[in-house]
Amino acid sequence: MTAATPAPTVPRNILSIQSWVAYGHVGNAAAVFPLQRLGFEVWAVNTVQFSNHTGYGAWTGSVFPPELVAELLDGIEARGALPGCDAVLSGYMGSEGTVAAVADAVRRVRAANPAALYCCDPVMGDVGRGVFVRPELPDLIAAQALPAADIVTPNQFELELLTGHAVHTLDDALAAAHVLRGRLNPGGPRVVVVTSLIREDAPEGGIETLAVTGDGAWLCRTPLIPLDPPRNGTGDTIAALFLGQVLRGASPAQALSLAMSALYALLDVTHRAGTREIQLVAAQNEFVQPTQVFPAEQVQGGVA
């Protein structure tokens, strides 16, 4: 008598509301595949569909009306699926209506599953480029999206913009991150992940990401790969990787280490390939188990 074949494990589900490009990898085109390789079902809701990312200076395609987000969520809800949504991930929000639509999507998901996490990547700008979204969006994201977020993943420029605190040193970054933590969902873990951290008191030749929680803060440092211009989509990818590792049960420190290690491998593959677009498919095994793991060093203890 043969043993019964065990039922397959049903993957957990993530609703990802971001932009989409047909060529290359930014927005959902950078986040969905890594999450799938980590074992998640991803319900992708696209806010735009462009031929390529706007960093090329020219593109074709359309921005979708914000009402489409609510309409698609209506359809998902009609399938009875929202109680099975474990997290919401959002990235670039191109308009006031999209910010409101994302905030409403989080509300609707949490009404069906109060345990669902919301990870907000507050895409607004970057060092060198400044603010590249509509001028009203930073305030709207701060007022509508961040108060619902459990995890927020600003880059250093966005951290400074959201808090009004200049970041030059590690202490500056920690102080600003705690200011931002105070504005997140009071019922959640309130995790701030600061990407692309460049500080005056850091050793040369590296790039860092900082994760700040109520239980402590951790810094993960990897070698700086000389990519010029910097590759688009890396922020979208690391937000997805960090959220995915947290949902898999990793602590913030473990999630930071695994996400940064996978991102380093992705950029190394991209650099060696000499391509303008990040090489998600070529580096896919690194998302599941990075070849080289960079540790996360604790730099601050727990706070009240």
Image (cartoon, rainbow, N blue to C red):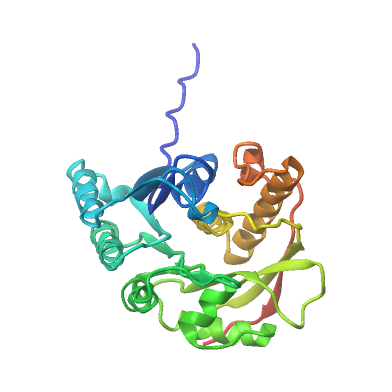
Please state if 115 lies on the left or on the right of 291 as rendered.
Answer: left
Query: Considering depth in this image, is 302 or 49 the residue closer to the camera?
Result: 49
In percent of width and height, residue 61 lies at 36, 45
Residue at figure coordinates x 66%, y 82% from the top left: 300
Q: Which residue lies furthest to the right in this view?
A: 204
Q: Looking at the image, how many numbered discs can be counted on the residues?
A: 0
Query: Considering depth in this image, is 44 or 256 the residue closer to the camera?
Result: 44
Question: As displayed, is residue 11 above or below residue 115?
Answer: above
In percent of width and height, residue 293 lies at 74, 54
In percent of width and height, residue 127 lies at 60, 73
In percent of width and height, residue 101 lies at 26, 62
Residue at figure coordinates x 62%, y 43% from the top left: 288
Please state if 224 lies on the left or on the right of 16 as rendered.
Answer: right
Question: As displayed, is residue 190 above or below residue 174?
Answer: above
Question: As displayed, is residue 89 above or below residue 6?
Answer: below
Residue at figure coordinates x 68%, y 71% from the top left: 219
Q: Residue furthest top?
A: 1
Q: Residue furthest front?
A: 58
Residue at figure coordinates x 38%, y 76% from the top left: 135
